[in-house]
Image (cartoon, grey):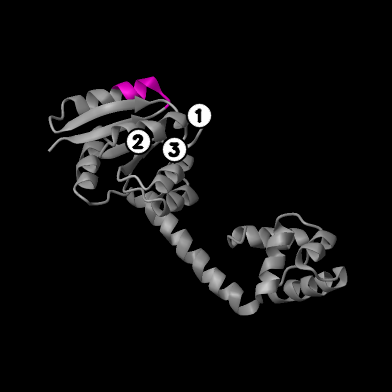
Amino acid sequence: MTINLVLVDDHPLVLNGLQQLFAVESEISVLACCTDGEQVLQTVIHYQPDILILDLKMPRKNGLAVLRELQKEKLPTKVVLLTAALDDDEVLEAIRLGVRGVVLKEMAPQLLVQCVNKVHAGGEWLEKDSVGRALEKMLKRETEMQYITQILTRREIKLVKLVANGLSNKLIAEKLFIAEGTVKVHLHNIYDKLQVKSRVALTLYAQEKGLV
């Protein structure tokens, strides 16, 4: 059975190299190529490929935005990311959005062919270092969130998020329908519980723990 592909990369040289790579594979066929994120959704809807090979860093619409659109459309096409670099948060979001394969461009080209075959057969091919770091980060955040929910109330957690998003006490009071003085009392209690001494320190804490 032929595996039908759509390729997406904003560099013509990369696209040309991918086409040549798959041209010698008798059981793989390239149906179309896209050079920016805006073209992808309609191309996938039109061709209904088995697999979409997608770069993350693209003009007009990045790979994660494309993945969100594909998920909304509930298309059966499986997605393999082929990218120069990934940060932990991108890996986690890509996995949540259903990516079945992750290959870094620095790897041997034949690994991409192996990835395509494995994903088409129903498996997964995830770049171990990037995915491992991302999952470790996710588990750490979940553990820290469990700790935070044990020492802060829901209202206090909401208030921390509002502070971290730059809202003043007055705006927080309006948003939570409480007095500005009550906000100050809550903040004092939060500082005490988290052992921080300022709004800046609280904001940095929230960012580090993944609250914003």
User: Position of 75 compared to 61: left or right?
Assistant: left
Q: Which residue is mark 1?
A: 59
Residue, x 39% and y 29% (percent of image)? 9
> Which label's residue is closer to the chain start, 2 or 1?
2
The residue carrying pointer 3 sits among few (fewer than 14), some (14 to 19) or many (20 or more) residues within 10 Å by Cα, namely many
Please state the extent of the stretch shown in magenta in the rendering. Answer: 10-16
User: Position of 178 compared to 112: left or right?
Assistant: right
Q: Amino acid at mark 3?
A: Leu
Callout 3–callout 1 Cβ contact below 8 Å: no
- Residue furthest bottom in the image: 150
The residue carrying pointer 1 sits among few (fewer than 14), some (14 to 19) or many (20 or more) residues within 10 Å by Cα, namely few
What is the C-alpha distance between the residues marked 3 and 2? 19 Å
Task: State the SS at label 2.
Answer: helix
User: Position of 114 compared to 175: left or right?
Assistant: left
- In the image, residue 121 above or below residue 33: below
Residue 156 x, y percent position in the rendering: 70, 72
Residue 157 x, y percent position in the rendering: 66, 69
Q: Which residue is mark 3?
A: 56
What is the C-alpha distance between the residues marked 2 and 1? 20 Å
Q: Which residue is mark 2?
A: 45
Residue, x 39% and y 32% (percent of image)? 42
Which part of the image, by quadrant, shows the N terminus? top left
